[in-house]
Image (spheres, grey):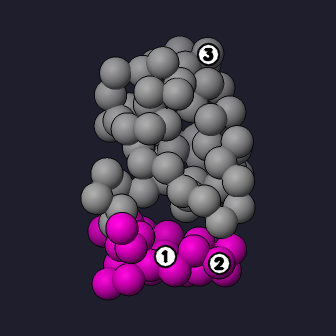
């Protein structure tokens, strides 16, 4: 993937305000990408210095391998997950 794509995804994620979340698909759409999986890949490789925790799965759940940290960070921003998901 090229640097421009990475920077577009990073910019979209940085623009998510504290206390709010977006899905991988929403981030992909805002960045002009077709694949939410590409967003996940970019965040895994180059997202440690941005609010990656504000990006959740389409069903509002956290990624299983980072669920503990991913649910704790939004909680600190006032986003309460119910049974590991954003309440609908």
> How many numbered marks does the figure carry?
3
Q: Judge whether 23 appears above or below 18 on screen.
A: above
Estimate the x, y position of residue 9 in percent, counting from the top left. 57, 31
* Left or right of 26, for residue 6: right
Residue, disc 3: 4
Q: Label for residue 71? A: 1
Kindly check if marks 3 and 2 are in contact, taking CB atoms under 8 A apart as contact.
no
Q: Judge whether 87 appears above or below 58 on screen.
A: below
Residue, disc 2: 78
Could you tell which of marks 3 and 1 lies nearer the N-terminus? Answer: 3
Mark 1 → mark 2, Cα distance in angstroms: 11 Å
Magenta span = 62-88
Tell me the element at label 3: helix
User: Residue 10 is drawn in which quadrant?
Assistant: top right
Estimate the x, y position of residue 64 in percent, counting from the top left. 30, 68
Which residue is at a point 42% across and 57% down the rendered structure image? Answer: 56
User: Residue 37 is drawn in which quadrant?
Assistant: top left
Kindly check if marks 1 and 2 are in contact, taking CB atoms under 8 A apart as contact.
no
Packing grade of label 3 (10 A; few <14, some 14-19, many >=20) is: few
User: Residue 46 is drawn in which quadrant?
Assistant: top right
- Residue 46 shows in the view: yes
């Amino acid at each position: 993937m090229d640097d421009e794509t990475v920077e577009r995804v990073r910019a979209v994620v940085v623009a998510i305000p504290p206390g709010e979340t977006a899905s991988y698909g929403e981030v992909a759409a805002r960045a002009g990408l077709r694949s939410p999986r590409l967003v996940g890949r970019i965040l895994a490789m180059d997202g440690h210095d941005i609010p990656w925790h504000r990006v959740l799965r389409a069903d509002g759940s956290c990624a299983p391998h980072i669920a503990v940290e991913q649910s704790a960070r939004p909680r600190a921003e006032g986003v309460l997950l119910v049974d590991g998901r954003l309440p609908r």
